[in-house]
Amino acid sequence: MPKSLRWPPSAKAALLRCGVPHAGRGKGPRLHDLRHVFAVHALLRWCQEGADLDAKLPVLATYLGHRFLAGTQRYLHLIAELFPEITARTSAAFGDVIPRRNGS
């Protein structure tokens, strides 16, 4: 494998190569944080595209190396950009289940 394609020997080395400052253990971004960002942005993109999340989430779980979907769920926090998409999908799917109250 060419040297340029090898994984850096440590998270600190990877951050330094990318020009991201790291002040030491517990005081800087971690490679784990990049996994979280990737997972959340993938979910956001799929929602915006109208993708079938029931089909996509197992793919994301596999890509992240999780055997079960529960391992992936901890990455998928509700972010402000995602809220309108989830609200619209929920309303479209279940809008008639709980009727709206008039006058309040």
Image (tube, rainbow, N blue to C red):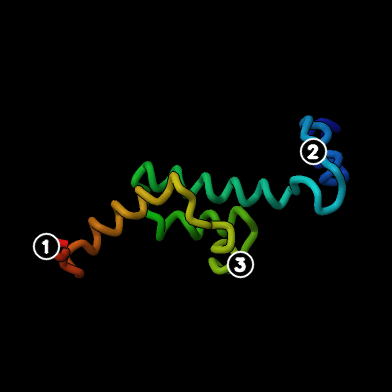
Name the residue type under label 2: Leu
Residue 68 is drawn in which quadrant?
bottom right
C-alpha gap between disc 3 and disc 1: 46 Å
Disc 1: which residue: 102
* 66 left or right, relative to 21: left
Name the residue type under label 3: Arg
Q: Give the residue at x 58% y 57%.
A: 75
C-alpha gap between disc 3 and disc 2: 28 Å
| Mark found first going from the N terminus, 3 or 2 | 2
Q: Give the residue at x 39% y 48%.
A: 47
Disc 3: which residue: 67
Tell me, yes or no, whether the two marked residues, 2 and 1, touch with CB atoms within 8 Å.
Answer: no
Q: Nearer the viewer, mark 2 or mark 1?
A: 1
For the C terminus, the image quarter is bottom left
The crowd level at tag 2 (other Cα within 10 Å; few <14, some 14-19, many 20+) is some
47 vs 96: above or below: above
Tell me, yes or no, whether the two marked residues, 3 and 1, touch with CB atoms within 8 Å.
Answer: no
For the N terminus, the image quarter is top right
C-alpha gap between disc 2 and disc 1: 54 Å
The crowd level at tag 1 (other Cα within 10 Å; few <14, some 14-19, many 20+) is few
| Mark found first going from the N terminus, 2 or 1 | 2
Name the residue type under label 1: Asn
In the image, residue 11 lies at what x, y percent?
82, 46
Q: Nearer the viewer, mark 3 or mark 2?
A: 2
